Image (cartoon, helix red, strand yellow):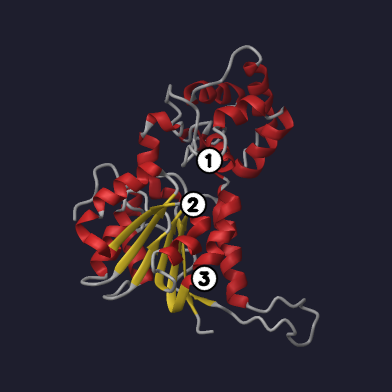
Amino acid sequence: MEQEVGHLPVMLEEVILALSPHPGSFQIDATVGGGGHAVRILEAANPDGRLLGIDADPRAIERSTKRLSGFGDRAVVRQANFEAMADVAGDNGFEAVDGILMDLGVSSQQLDDDDRGFSFRSSDELDMRFDTRVGIPASEVVASYGEAELADVFKRHGEEPHARRIARAIVAERAKADIETPAQLAEIVTRATPRPKNPRRRRIHPATRVFQALRIEVNRELETLPAALESAIDLLKPDGRICVISYHSLEDRIVKRFLARERRGCTCPPELPVCVCGKQPRVANVGAQPQLPSETEVATNPRARSAKLRAARRLPA
């Protein structure tokens, strides 16, 4: 099948190699998005492999359902946050699987939807939620959080070095008029941010870290990720594979530390001469850690620029 226009799945070949889908295998794409990875996984698992696609975004569910319809009952698509992966898998006959993919972050399709609030140029509502039925929009965060709270969000979720300065500017501007659109917010952040001395930093929009921080805040992304990783390992059969693609250091740090802990097993203090916790390693690395996109891919798909892929396989109990 051809790739959907405007959507290029990141590190596709590396994902397929790491997951190694095969005929008869059961796979989960926990962030199915537009279905780009899912199509290739199902093709590699011909003729009878099955895939469960999960996404919190109802528009992604519409796109992927249409995209995967040609695979018939081999593809099952369900709307849910991936923190509910275990329940969704159990309800749909995927209690034990051979592979799980988690492609984190915002997709090019979400950025292209101006009314979602992800784009700096959008004059639509400042929302940023993947599922608008859950939580509060980013506009409410911007309108109701105090200066210290905003600065904390920008620092923790965006690693923004000018967090306090930007928060102060937002509070001052919202006292004059409501900040309702992404374009308004991007302009305020741009004016509040000093011009970078490094020419490379000037290529990145000044509001990038603030928008990332707000998106993470309203979607609880860093809160739901650990639970999703835990569920994924529990669902894997022995020698089943997990692949996680992250796009910023906050996500990658969580994934890296989680897999390191699962590789290590024992959680006893280092001063103890022997293990008393009894915990065994549950995973082993698959390939180099992390894997990075090729220069060729970055040139054709700029979204892949910051991607890091970490992969592991489930060890026998």
Residue 210 sits in quarter: top right
Point out the residue furthest to the front here: 91
In the picture, which quadrant includes the N terminus? bottom left
Where residue 135 appears, as percent x and y from the top left, is 56, 39
Q: Which residue is mark 2?
A: 81
Q: Which residue is mark 3?
A: 233
Where residue 224 appears, as percent x and y from the top left, is 57, 53
- For disc 2, the neighbor class at 10 Å (few under 14, some 14 to 19, many from 20) is many
- Above or below: residue 33 compared with residue 200: below
Q: Nearer the viewer, mark 2 or mark 3?
A: 2
Q: Are marks 1 and 3 in contact (CB under 8 Å)?
A: no
Depth order, front residue of 169/79: 79
- Above or below: residue 275 compared with residue 186: below
Point out the residue furthest to the right here: 271
Instruction: Tell me the SS state at disc 3.
Output: helix
- Mark 1 / mark 3, whichever is N-terminal: 1
- Mark 2 / mark 3, whichever is N-terminal: 2
Q: Are marks 2 and 1 in contact (CB under 8 Å)?
A: yes
Q: Which residue is mark 1?
A: 134
Residue type at mark 1? Val
